[in-house]
Image (tube, rainbow, N blue to C red):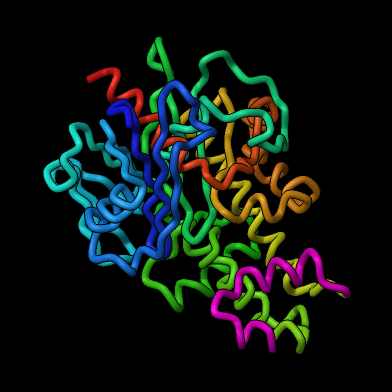
């Protein structure tokens, strides 16, 4: 096979997806692809070696998006005992070019190449040509990133803004913050506005006692290893829906909208805001009909400006993989 092939990876604590791309074939048609249970391997080196050996492929470059901050080419994954080191990967895999990206940097890196079918638009707005783009991704945690036009192309940058301190915007949210401060030393946006955060909001409203908990939902939550799908399903799809779960989801949408608006202001995202992560595609109707967009625009004198900012949901579940591949191809050209 050609040594022009690019290996891309989306490295997570639970699963890792690898794919090999040929630059002339486009990024939506990988030469080979595989998904693996991360915990089955001692490290990324062993996983990649097994994949490439099985596929009988030789690659010229590799780029991996990892769930954690990347500092000087190294990253320690949050939920997996792996230390990923780009220099070590180059040596052990005998690949000339190896790059590591934060997972939100990888998602952001895909935005310039996404197709219309990869997106669901919540607010068409009026994007500024070459305006800065913001990315916020509620999944297991809350990731944030952004892209800046450098005069030739967009460059993606990571952020750990999801770990910034939560700022309530209503009396109920102030009570929620007080409730969580009794349980956590630091209450970040991720502690509330993510898959791990939805159960915290649910617990607040349940313990407050204003809305009764349905016994059927309580039973499902008691048995679930991941309570978030139970809450979302009971809010949106159950008959009858759970008022407690719907209030939980509305609070989540209020806080997500407010923080997306915060990010748009901080980076002046006149090019648009993109919602990534696993949660937004599952709650599209609630994003459209619920309080998200009002909370996004509720910034006083900047309401009218934010109303002009396009807001899109990323539907493609492989966006981080595409972004890693795209970034790897650019890096090879620039080196």
Q: Magenta region, mostly helix, strand or loop?
A: helix
- Can residue 150 be seen at all in this image of the molecule? yes
* Residue 227 magenta-highlighted: yes
Residue at the image point whose x is 68% and y is 71% from the top? 231
Viewer-closest of 25 and 203: 25
- Can residue 175 be seen at all in this image of the molecule? no
Residue at the image point whose x is 34% and y is 68% from the top? 39
Q: Is residue 249 left or right of residue 166?
A: right
In the rendered image, residue 228, in percent from the top left (x then y), is placed at 61, 69
In the rendered image, residue 179, in percent from the top left (x then y), is placed at 53, 75
Residue at the image point whose x is 27% and y is 37% from the top? 58
Q: Is residue 205 left or right of residue 332?
A: right
89 over 332 or under it: above or below: below
Q: Is residue 59 left or right of residue 197?
A: left
Q: Quadrant of residue 59?
A: top left
Q: Which stretch is magenta?
A: 219-239
| Quarter the N terminus occupies | top left
| Quarter the C terminus occupies | top left
């Amino acid at each position: 096979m050609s040594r022009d092939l690019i290996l891309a990876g989306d490295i997570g604590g639970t699963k890792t997806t690898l794919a090999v791309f040929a630059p002339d074939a486009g990024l939506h048609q990988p030469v080979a692809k595989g998904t693996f249970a991360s915990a089955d391997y001692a490290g990324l080196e062993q996983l990649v070696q097994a994949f490439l050996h099985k596929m009988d492929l030789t690659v010229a470059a590799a780029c991996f998006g990892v769930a954690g901050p990347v500092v000087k080419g190294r990253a320690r994954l949050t939920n997996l005992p792996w230390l990923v080191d780009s220099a070590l990967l180059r040596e052990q895999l005998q690949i000339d070019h190896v790059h590591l990206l934060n997972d939100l940097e990888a998602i952001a890196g895909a935005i310039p190449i996404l197709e219309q079918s990869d997106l669901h638009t919540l607010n068409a707005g009026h994007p500024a040509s070459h305006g800065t783009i913001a990315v916020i991704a509620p999944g297991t945690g809350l990731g944030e990133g952004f892209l800046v036009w450098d005069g030739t192309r967009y460059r993606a940058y990571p952020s750990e803004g999801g770990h910034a301190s939560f700022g309530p915007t209503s009396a109920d949210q102030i009570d929620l913050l007080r409730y969580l401060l009794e349980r956590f030393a630091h209450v970040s946006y991720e502690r509330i506005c993510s898959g791990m955060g939805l159960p915290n909001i649910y617990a607040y409203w349940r313990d407050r006692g204003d809305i009764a908990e349905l016994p059927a939902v309580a039973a499902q939550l008691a048995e679930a290893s991941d309570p978030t799908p139970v809450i979302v399903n009971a809010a949106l799809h159950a008959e009858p829906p759970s008022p407690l779960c719907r209030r939980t989801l509305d609070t989540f949408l209020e806080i997500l909208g407010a923080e997306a608006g915060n990010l748009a202001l901080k980076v002046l995202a006149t090019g648009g805001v993109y919602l990534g992560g696993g949660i937004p595609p599952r709650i599209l109707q609630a994003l459209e009909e619920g309080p998200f967009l009002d909370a996004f625009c509720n910034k006083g004198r900047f309401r009218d400006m934010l109303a002009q900012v396009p807001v899109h949901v990323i539907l493609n579940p492989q966006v981080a993989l595409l972004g890693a591949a795209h970034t790897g191809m650019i890096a090879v050209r620039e080196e």
